[in-house]
Image (cartoon, helix red, strand yellow):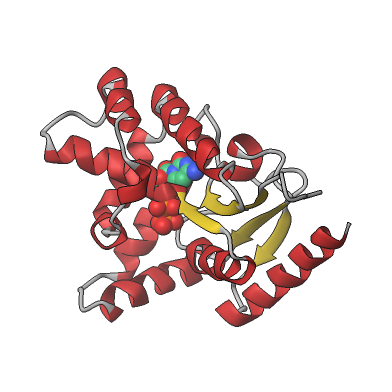
Amino acid sequence: MTSDQTPLVIAVDGPAAAGKGTLSRRLAAHYRLNHLDTGLTYRATAKALIDRGLPLDDEAVAARTAGGLDLSHLDRSVLSAHEIGEAASRVAVMPQVRTALVEAQRGFSQTMPGAVLDGRDIGTVVCPDALIKFYVTATPEVRAKRRFDEITGNGGSADLASIQADIEKRDARDSERADSPLRPAADAHLLDTTEMGIEAAFEAARRLVDAALEH
Ligand code: CDP
């Protein structure tokens, strides 16, 4: 239920390289909402630690770093590097880091007119009251190929087998951690994009959002 006073929130979760980001950007543009890729907040925390020569596993230091981030200045082109994803999933297991970032993410979600947030725990922890929740997935093979195409499409070089191995390792770390593990919210709509292009995924999601808005 939304009104002029209530921000409209759409939660998009799922494993690495499932297509959450592209879908979320499309939904945000269509419904004129803000968009936050919450993965960038974990990536920015990891990158700040690396740049300052600080350890990735000191919880107090990492939480202070996370608390000092400016969410309005997250540079996707720098943060999307494949290696930063691995470091991000290591800092993301620490509860104090999550507390600092989740607070900022919730604040973002409550800014009018509302937002699409994508990540691992949006529907379960960050925005449990979202109007609608999606859990986007695809087989590890397809997700690895998409990440490979993204890297090589940007002029980089990559090895498909090692990308798949990295993605599977990161999914396992994200799913097995004690705090806010990766899992679909009970009321999430499952979108398996293994055999679905971005347009088809967007159309399926749009129909479900429109139906939720009518209730
Ligand atoms: O783009 P990709 O799916 O590869 O990763 P990402 O969404 O940028 O997330 C990077 C890492 O941050 C994930 O592997 C998670 O460990 C962590 N993360 C999280 O714990 N919670 C979120 N809401 C978003 C990301």
Image quadrant holding the C terminus, namely bottom right
Can you name the residue that lies furthest to the front here? 4
Q: Which residue corresponds to the image point at 40% horizontal and 26% vertical from the top-left?
A: 94
Is 159 located above or below residue 153 in the figure?
above
Count of picture labels: 0
Can you name the residue that lies furthest to the top here? 60
Q: Which residue corresponds to the image point at 36% horizontal and 48% vertical from the top-left?
A: 72
Left or right of 139, for residue 163: left
Is 169 located above or below residue 181 in the figure?
below
Left or right of 33, for residue 101: left
Residue 147 x/y as whole percent = 38, 69
Q: Is residue 163 visible?
A: yes
| Residue 93 figure quarter | top left
Is 38 located above or below residue 33 in the figure?
above
Residue 142 x/y as whole percent = 49, 72
The residue lying toward the viewer, choosing from 152 and 119, is: 119
| Residue 206 figure quarter | bottom right
Q: Which residue corresponds to the image point at 21% horizontal and 39% vertical from the top-left?
A: 48
Q: Which residue corresponds to the image point at 27% horizontal and 63% vertical from the top-left?
A: 77
Q: Is residue 172 visible?
A: no
Residue 46 x/y as whole percent = 27, 40
The residue lying toward the viewer, choosing from 178 and 102, is: 102
Can you name the residue that lies furthest to the right here? 215
